[in-house]
Image (spheres, grey):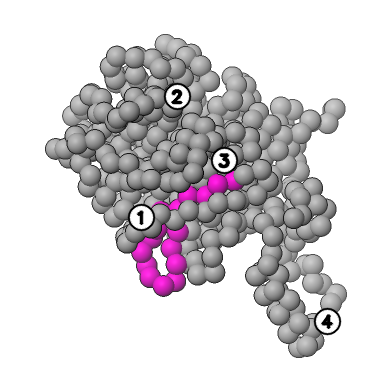
Amino acid sequence: MITLQDAKSEVEQPNRKHPRSWAKGYILTPLVLLLLCISGVVVFLFMPELPWTAQSFAVNASVCGRWEVIARPNLGFNVSTSSFNSIGVASIEDIWFTGTIDNFDDSEQQPLIVRWKGEHFRDTYIPPGDWLYSGMDGVAAVTQDDVWVIGHDYWDKLLMRWNGDRWSRVPLPSGVNPVGPYLNAVAAVTKNDVWIAGCCDASNNSSVMMHWNGKIWDIIPYPTTPATSTVLSDIAVIAVNDIWVVGSHDEANTLITHWNGSIWEVVPSPNLCKVKNTLVSVSAIGANDVWAVGACSDEDTGGRIAWGKTLIEHWDGTRWSIVQGPGLLGPHQLTGVAAISPDDVWAVGVSWTNANYPVVEHTVVMHWDGKQWSVIPSPNQSSAQSFYDVAAVSKDEIWAVGESENQVFSARFIRTACPTP
């Protein structure tokens, strides 16, 4: 098995501006072309799971490092599309990824769970069943032997648990409508204290909060709102009596609620744009330091390009306020945030550099250094690439996941010491 260090020295990355420049100066005869094609097939069939060559850079005085684009896990030879939607960290060497996979045999998407162990993808799990438009939408890794995942199957909700040996499907509590919109977020305080946010209750007209007490799942009363459509998108856990949930009302207004150990309460949150405002990810450093990100727009075009601006909000212990992000050209949105310390927060997302079709999608990475947000160069290897989630494995290793050219995509940022000015 070739190690990560071996891969860095043996794999040469093509020039990004001129992808074919590596072949300049070579005359490829038909025989050579045939041999290259045959050898390429052999390499593809037996290629080990190696990261691409790292790309190093210095952004500012506080962030220096390199991106390592991780080779895709072996999902088989019949995969048409796939994506990673979320990431959960059990330890620095044990990371879980959830998403969606589709094959050429049919158009029925299936739920996907992949495990990173040590320095490579080790286990891939596709739950057995007759799936239709299915996927896994969230993961919470309590320990290496205790992992929860949530997902959907057409209109059905999925809840599964890993016990260190196998995955099993867990029934929903009786008060949750098993059909309808999805469960969107799962987070764990301890193995006996796990939360799930989503939609809907048995009447199918209210958001639902589910709680695991170590034995059973219960429905915890959640405040009702006058909105016709309430979306709960993500959960951040600080303590048993300090938990945040973010989302939106009718996509028009941001929604933030807080658990104080007894009840859920709506906390006022600002809007940045006139028409649409939504928060999709939240991460907490402490009781007085919480970040939430999403997107907003001053117009409604009826499509995803309507999301024109990144939305960043911060809790200082007293109130939520909007924090200015770096200026970006074209429509863009943030999809994930990971807060490490007061001067070390990461956010990821996607930007569209062409409002007309075909749309060009690029990953977006931002960093907060305690004073301002800056754009971090991110590994864009195609014209259709997005980040959907981010997680800090340690202060020096940050993972981002999504899709590239309709296939799963993951990359990690390895922090290095900045050179002396």
Residue type pointed to by label 2: Thr
Q: Residue 27 got which mark? A: 4
Q: Position of residue 301 (x, y in %)?
A: 33, 50
Q: Secondary structure at mark 4?
A: loop
Q: Is residue 135 left or right of residue 82?
A: left
Mark 4 vs mark 1: which is more N-terminal? 4
Marks 2 and 1 close (CB-CB < 8 Å): no
Residue ID at (40%, 34%): 186
Q: Secondary structure at mark 1?
A: strand
Mark 1 vs mark 3: which is more N-terminal? 3
Q: CA distance from mark 3 to mark 2?
A: 17 Å
Q: CA distance from mark 2 to mark 1?
A: 28 Å
Residue ID at (53%, 61%): 75
Numbered range of the magenta stretch: 100-116
> Which quadrant is the C terminus positioned in?
top right
Residue type pointed to by label 1: Ser
The verdict on residue 115 being magenta is yes
Q: Is residue 372 left or right of residue 314?
A: right
Q: Secondary structure at mark 2?
A: strand
Where 359 falls versus 226 (above or below)? below
